[in-house]
Amino acid sequence: MDEMKERLEALRTEALNELELVGDPQKLNDLRVKYLGKKGALTEILRGMGALSAEERPVIGQVGNEVRAAIEAVIEEKQSVFQQAETENRLRAETIDVTLPGSKLPAGAVHPLNKVAQEIEDIFVGLGYTIAEGPEVETDYFNFEALNLPKDHPARDMQDSFYITDDILMRTQTSPVQIRTMKAMNGKTPVKVICPGKVYRRDDDDATHSFQFNQIEGLVIGPNIRMSDLKGTLLQFAQLMFGKQAQIRLRPSFFPFTEPSAEVDISCAQCGGEGCRMCKHTGWLEILGCGMVHPRVLEMGGYDPNEVSGFAFGMGVERIALLKYGIDDIRHFYTNDARFLGQFVRMQG
């Protein structure tokens, strides 16, 4: 028994000395296996307990447990030290300097059509107009009949649309919003609104046409509204949108919902009215249609044409954008070509 005690004490001393000098987690694990493993030194000594008497075995067992506890305590302490050092090293390696500037993201910009629409809205809001909106899916009544376009009217052919039922369709213009506004006003004046939004027509897509496009219409109703008021408004709009040098001219035309009606041309910004390829050497470019509100439309909207009058106008946002930026194909606005859209990032930046 005394010999076994001496061997256990010698094992404790040897193990503690080696553990004191260990410098890495792998070496520490090797020593744990060496001394405490199933085939370790401590297990090897304790196997000799079978030769001891019944009185000696508890004594040696107690000494063996003390040796195991002493070695395990040092191993756990060393493991804690190594784990703390590893955590500190990882924190240093993974440290992020939050004071450094972040990665620069590519700059975006407002889409050219949205930008032009916002400019048009800002101009007319500055002139005292309010913005009115309505549904893109409309009834035949608001889209055609209330605008002096009965079911057999030939002008409907020019606005052949996408019908959902015989009486429901995708609106072909934002004029239905004008009728809805007039009815909501219940005969009160003044009415002074612009109506922006998407419209739909069964056009073949080409450089100047699309089955879906953006339109902004305007409506003014009140006592003694004259054609001269319309012309002055459109001249001011043209000069605010295209520059003070811009001039306009009105050419007689026909629209079922206005009488008299006119097409409006603007002097070519590229050549100053001298004539160039862009304006086909005429010096003028068509930008919108307009006219005095037809008496029948006033009646359908709840107004007495003997008491009030009004004017209306309508423009395609794509058309204005083509002229403003000198673009030759409406399809550029919809193809999402980053090279094309990138020009407007630079213009706005």
Image (cartoon, rainbow, N blue to C red):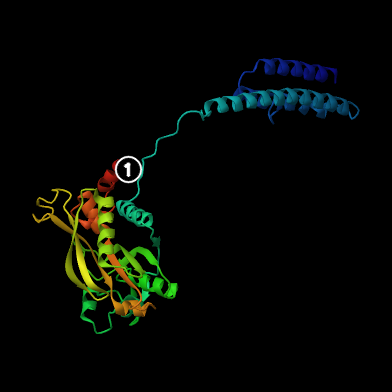
Image side of residue 41 versus residue 306, left or right: right
Q: Evaluate whether residue 164 shows in this view.
A: no
Q: Residue 320: image x %, image y %?
A: 25, 56
Q: Residue 27: image x %, image y %?
A: 61, 22
Quadrant hosting residue 128: bottom left
Image side of residue 190 versus residue 61, left or right: left
The residue that appears at 26% across and 59% down in the rendered structure is 232
Tell me: residue 347, above or below residue 180: above
Tell me: residue 9, above or below residue 230: above
Q: Secondary structure at mark 1?
A: helix
Image side of residue 172 versus residue 191, left or right: left
Q: Residue 103: image x %, image y %?
A: 42, 34
Quadrant housing the N terminus: top right
Of residues 233 and 137, which is closer to you in this image? 233
Q: Evaluate whether residue 181 shows in this view.
A: yes
Look at mark 1 in the image and give the residue it sits on.
348
Quadrant hosting residue 192: bottom left
Residue flagged by tag 1: what amino acid is it?
Gln
Q: Residue 349: image x %, image y %?
A: 33, 40
Of residues 173 and 60, which is closer to you in this image? 173
Tell me: residue 268, above or below residue 60: below
